[in-house]
Amino acid sequence: MTKVLVAGTFDIIHPGHINLIEQAKELGALNQSLRSGLGSDNFLVVIIARDENVKKMKGRNPYFDENKRLNQLKDVLSKTKRPGDWKVVLGDLDDPYKIIKQEKPDVIGMGYDQQNYVKGLHDLAVNSDLHFKIERLKPFKEDVCKGKSIRKALEDEQARFAESRRAGFLLINKPMDWTSHDVVAKLRSITGIKQIGHTGTLDPFATGLLICAIGQATKIAGVFNVLSKIYEAAITLGVTSDTYDRTGKIPIRPRAHGREVNPKFHPRINRGLNNSQISKSKIQNILKSFIGKQQQLPPMFSAKKVDGKKLYEIARQGKTIARKPSEIEIYKIELLRYKIQPTFRQAQGGARNKQIPNPKSQIPNFEIRIVCSTGTYIRTLAHDIGQKLGTGAILEELKRTAIGDFNINEAVRLDQLTKDNYSKYLIKPLEAINRVNEFYARYVFR
């Protein structure tokens, strides 16, 4: 058995703590991850710092007392498949190394920013009969998963009184043709609060779940970035555009009798496809190939910044620049619906611009559900599907239905909100963090 030990305050539990525990187990399990369960040959010991010792080291009391912190971490670890392969204990008030001497670990994992007891641990490893290795653990999204910043937001006067309509998160059902900033502006108008932001931009033509942060909750909104997202998307084949969706410019339009078809009748179709080019089974096989981790190139028409400029600002000038791909992960992708629509051609000898169905040329379109990591561009996914199929594709419709376990069914429409009632829809900051932890722990320990 390999015994791994970690210690810390573990005050306000956040995804960084959960990731730390995953890394600690990996130290003992070598390449075995908690995602496949806690192995029977590994044991984890977590030491929770005592209130009195925290005050001595940090000059302040922890946000939660030691028993609350102990039980919170036990609750997180209970999500593992083998709940008997760990234990959480309170540290000793007088001897910070007492538990280490009792447990005799094989490996001790230290936080990436741990400063206290570093020299003492090295001295103990060298000058005692204990034989343990000391390993530094890697940071995890330290810009948003840092206890100090989360505590500061929670202790802010506004965050303390979230129930008095000052701070929290609103789940908004974004309407079509609204930008995410339009939603924020509307909320500022409704609530009278200027400090409002959102997590995870939705394109104007997209609909669905947009999580908006009110007041000091904006300072901890980044924790949502560890959560997976679920989208439902409609994709049309045989079409391309510069934005990879239906709002962009179509470079080629079909021609009839040597003339370009009037875009009033044929606004988007690039080319029709015959039945031999595409099939439902072929689409399903292509979709499977996108499951897993991969490098995705952000589209030119996106808010991603390069050298301080947003890509869409450069794209609007008719320019294309080199972009670095980002690692994303698609956990699941499924075909919901598949149908074929006819294209149209200009009738011969008939009225000017009269269009009739063309039975030899058809446009397949389909709907899919995607479960993916933060940072995934569904427009790019649609484009890449078209590339693999050799047909071209655009994103016709997009709806975000979930972020972690925050679901569209919980969301409220903007026209339902007033200054007097919006507070009843607020999710308090600490409640939101706990829900993020619950979902993220299930993912890590699955």
Image (cartoon, rainbow, N blue to C red):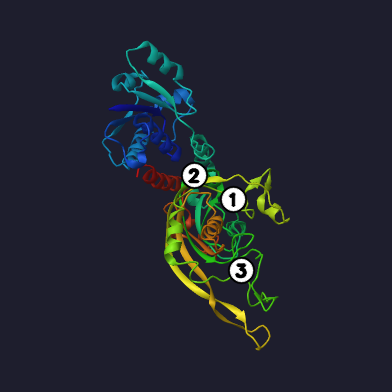
Q: How many marks?
A: 3
Identify which amino acid the numbered label 2 is placed on: Val
Q: Position of residue 201 (x, y in %)?
A: 57, 54
Mark 2–mark 3 Cα distance, whole angstroms, equals 41 Å
Q: Nearer the viewer, mark 2 or mark 3?
A: 3
Q: CA distance from mark 1 to mark 2?
A: 22 Å
User: Where is the N terminus found, in terms of image quarters?
Assistant: top left
According to the picture, the residue beneath numbered tag 2 turns out to be 223
Residue 389 visible? The answer is yes
Q: Residue furthest right?
A: 317
Q: CA distance from mark 3 to mark 1?
A: 23 Å
Query: Please, what is the three-letter code of the amino acid marked with disc 1?
Result: Pro
In front: mark 1 or mark 2? 1
The answer to whether residue 322 is left or right of residue 12 is right
Left or right: 26, with 328 as reference point: left
Picture coordinates of residue 223 (x, y %)? Answer: 49, 44
Residue 35: x, y in percent? Answer: 36, 42
Give the labeled residue for mark 3. Answer: 270
Q: Are marks 2 and 3 in contact (CB under 8 Å)?
A: no
**Which residue is depicted at the point 41% across and 22% down?**
134
Q: Find disc 1 in the rendering and name its residue.
A: 298
Kindly state the secondary structure of the residue where label 2 is placed.
Answer: helix
For the point 67% across and 49% down, the residue is 310
Q: Nearer the viewer, residue 146 or 338?
A: 338
Pick the front one: 255 or 441: 255
Q: Quadrant of the C terminus?
A: top left
Q: Is residue 404 above or below residue 255?
A: above
- Front residue of 18 and 397: 397
Q: Earlier in the sequence, mark 2 or mark 3?
A: 2
Q: Of label 3 and label 1, which has the lower sequence position?
A: 3
Element at label 1: loop
Tell me if I can see residue 407 in this picture.
Answer: no
